[in-house]
Amino acid sequence: MDYKDYYEILSVSRDASTEDIRKAYRRLARKYHPDVNPNNKEAEERFKEINEAHEVLTDPEKRRKYDQFGRSWQQYQQTGGDPGGFDWSQWYAPGAQGAPGGQRQTYTEYVDLNDLFGEGGFSDFFHNLFGGGGQRGARPSPFARGGRDIEQPVEVSLAEAFDGTVRVLQTGSRRLEVKIPPGVRTGSRVRVAGEGEPSPAGGPAGDLYLVVQVREHPQFRRQGDDLLLRLPVDLYTMVLGGEMTLQTLKGQRLALTIPPETRAGRTFRLRGQGMPKLRTPEEHGDLLVEVYPEIPQELTEKEQELFRQLAELRR
């Protein structure tokens, strides 16, 4: 198994701040994004490496363990040790193939690049160091039939799909914590490696797939990575113009300028205020605000008379 230098992959120093790491990730992710490089296997592999490095270096616990492992690896190399003789087992995450023990009280698996590219999104190095399977030592026989995959539905709110969330599953005596990433849609599948049915023939266990269902929101409607909001505006502002305040799904309050004589159904686009994109969650879709007039109620006699005068003027 090869050592991966995540700092080198992102071209950052080992003492780089989390914000510097995120900036480097955004720059490289845009460059190697599959949508920018269609049918380019080399760019796809580079994109996987970038995402894997970002996953580790922006998580304090993972980064701490990775840095400890890196120092041990460098010391071993400096003594002239053969890479093939390095003792990987002491660093294996509980439950990784070849790891000592085998009982796991807690397990965390990410909807990862497997959800984007199929099998093999994260490397064996990642899985062995942080969990979720991987390969070490002798591989199972290619003729050994693996266990069956299992699918299980999981429901999340639109707000949870925006921020990302965690679902806790209990399988026998073990507790699984499964991370649902920002930007998931209805139909997204979160892979939990090795948690499907065991193999009847000594092969690898199957995988568990959580199939995501995103609940509808009472105010916001999703259109791909964009969000649609219907905003009631008082009749006078629609006619004369003015400023309205709205609240985004994230809870941020924004001011929206309504021009004079705005027609009902006009849509305003607020860029970057929509859902995070699953492949590059640092980027967001847009918020589309459709305005419609609120008709004033319980008019006084004087107000009714003024509306009648206005109607006569319009005729």
Image (cartoon, grey):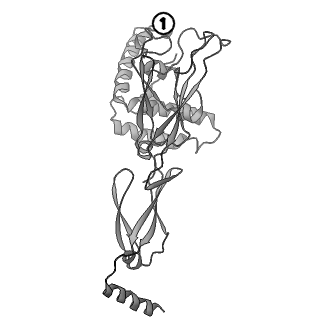
Counting labels gives 1
Q: Nearer the viewer, residue 234 or 295?
A: 295
Q: Determine the residue positioned at 53% across, 12% down.
A: 136
Callout 1 secondary element: helix
Disc 1 designates what residue? 85
Give the side of residue 154 with respect to residue 206, left or right: left
| 18 relative position to 39: left or right | left
Q: Residue at x 61, y 12 (%)?
A: 203
Q: Using the rendered image of the protein, determine whether residue 162 is visible from the camera's viewpoint.
A: yes
Q: x, y percentage for residue 294? A: 40, 72
**Considering only vertical position in the picture, is 301 above or below 293?**
below
Residue 187, placed above or below residue 126: below
Mark 1 closeness class: few <14, some 14–19, many ≥20 residues within 10 Å:
few
The amino acid on which the numbered mark 1 sits, given as a three-letter code, is: Gly
Position of residue 143 measured from the top left corner of the image (x, y, whole percent) = 68, 12
x, y (%) of residue 177?
A: 41, 27
Q: Is residue 278 visible?
A: no
- The residue positioned 45% from the left and 17% from the top of the image is 172
Q: Position of residue 119 (x, y in %)?
A: 59, 27
- Up the image or down, 79 lies above or below 270; here it is above
Rendered image quadrant of residue 18: top left
Instruction: Name the one closer to the observer, 94 or 214.
Output: 214
- The image quadrant of residue 35 is top right
